[in-house]
Image: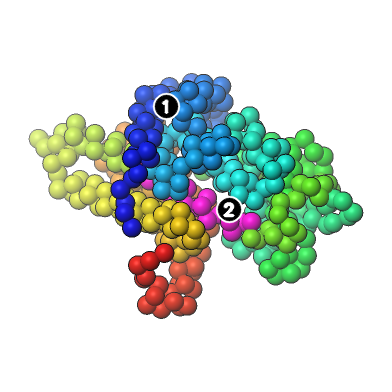
Amino acid sequence: MDFTLPPHVDEVRQRVRAFIEREIMPLEDDPANYDEHENIKLDVLETARAKARAEGLWAPQMPKDLGGMGLPHVGWAAVYEEANRSIFGPVSMNCAAPDDGNMNILSKVATPAQQERWLMPIIRGEVRSAFVMTEPHPGSGSDPTMMLTTAERKNDRYIVRGRKWFITGAGEAKHFILIARTSDDPRRGMSAFLFDRDQPGWNIERRIPIMGPEEHGGHCELIFDGLEIPIENRLMEEGDGLKLTQIRLGPARLTHCMRWLGLAKRCMEIAQTYANEREGFGVRLANRETVQVALGDVAADIEIGRLLTMKAAWLLDQGDRAKTAVSMAKIHVADTLHKAADTAIQINGARGYSKDTILEWIYRYARQARLVDGASEVHKMVLAQAYKKDGQDFWGWGA
């Protein structure tokens, strides 16, 4: 396993770093560039996206023949990390969740007609999308087999009834991927569907207030009371919903890690800069052993996270599901992001707790990392089950 980036990937990485520093990071400094939910205003975003397109830095995860940059997973890791040096970076380059994961799954499993209708507008940045799976208790959360929302087949269409919640981006989305129950089969009881915002038979009950900050479109609760979906808008075959979910969530979890590493590195950058400048009791913070130990500890954790993430990305490029590798990365990087933000705030003192830096933004955002796309405890259970099955082979060297 060689961690040297291919020259063409490293060239893109360097271009992304320069673009983010020159065009995107300065946007963070002006409060007028934020919407009421503490994300980048949509009109400001459109200008940033136009600049990203002009630089050839658009949809790095998509194949070139679909309008993307055609990078491998290891390329995603390098580029996403640089993009999320800014809190506005990934969305400016069209590689932010949930569109990122939705584009990836549609590029893999949708028919050509479905790709033209549902995928291409997302790639072009004309619409946003949402993945509709999670339900309130007693429905499905980390365990999708508990799903209660149903899609009943009637002739050439499906009738959907049920409730979903914490659907990221739903408030701004136009295209939706829905997972619903079509039978009681424990493995093939769910199916996947596509529907449009303008279709009748469903509504957004509320935008759920969160600790924040929020993605564009928030995290919403949806009610389905007779949504009709034509059979041609079913993704894959009936009963393939769980399979589709597994195909989508593995890479999607890993792309979170790629982006979070960028935010963790930004926290280090802010902390180190302040430690170099701030002096107290005749000593610069950077020369205090306690500060050095704290920064060194976070630096090591970030590097561990990068290695775990890159290994998982490499495995995906080899055609492996990388299930345990992704879980390891997800657990560690989620913890590291929170630790990096917390450490940086402590070093910056009251300045870090204020809105004079983006540290408090990242700190609040970081708390969700141990919950989204599977709580850390669930991923630890995945690792325990794999170890129970594989024993000493759990720590193999190959793919």
Q: Callout 1: few (<14), some (14-19), or many (20+) C-alpha neighbours within 10 Å?
A: many
Q: Residue 149 appears at what percent x and percent y?
A: 75, 56
Looking at the image, residue 216 sits to the left or right of residue 29; the answer is right
Q: What element carries label 1?
A: helix
In terms of image quadrants, where is residue 387?
bottom left
Pick whichever, 305 or 399, lies toward us.
399
Which residue occupies 40% across, 72% down? 394
Up-down relation of residue 48 to residue 147 (above or below): above
Q: Which quadrant holds the C terminus?
A: bottom left
Q: Earlier in the sequence, mark 2 or mark 1?
A: 1
Q: Is mark 2 on a helix, strand or loop?
A: helix
Instruction: Name the residue rendered at 60%, 31% in the picture.
Output: 124
For residue 245, above or below residue 4: below
**Quarter assignment of residue 116:** top right
Residue hosting label 2: 248
State the colouring used for the structure image: rainbow
Q: Is residue 179 located in the magenta-colored stretch of the structure?
A: no
Can residue 1 be seen at all in this image of the molecule? yes
* Predominant secondary structure, magenta span: helix
Q: In this view, does 260 lie to the left or right of 192?
A: left
| Of the pair 253 and 168, the residue shown nearer to us | 253
The residue mark sitting in front, 2 or 1, is 2
Three-letter amino acid code at the position of disc 1: Ile
At a point 41% along the width and 48% down the height, the residue shown is 74
Gap between marks 2 and 1, in whole Å? 28 Å
Chain part drawn in magenta? 244-262
Residues 44 and 136: in front is 44
Q: Residue 261 lies in magenta, yes or no?
A: yes
Residue 201 is situated, as x and y percent measured from the top left of the image, at 82, 43
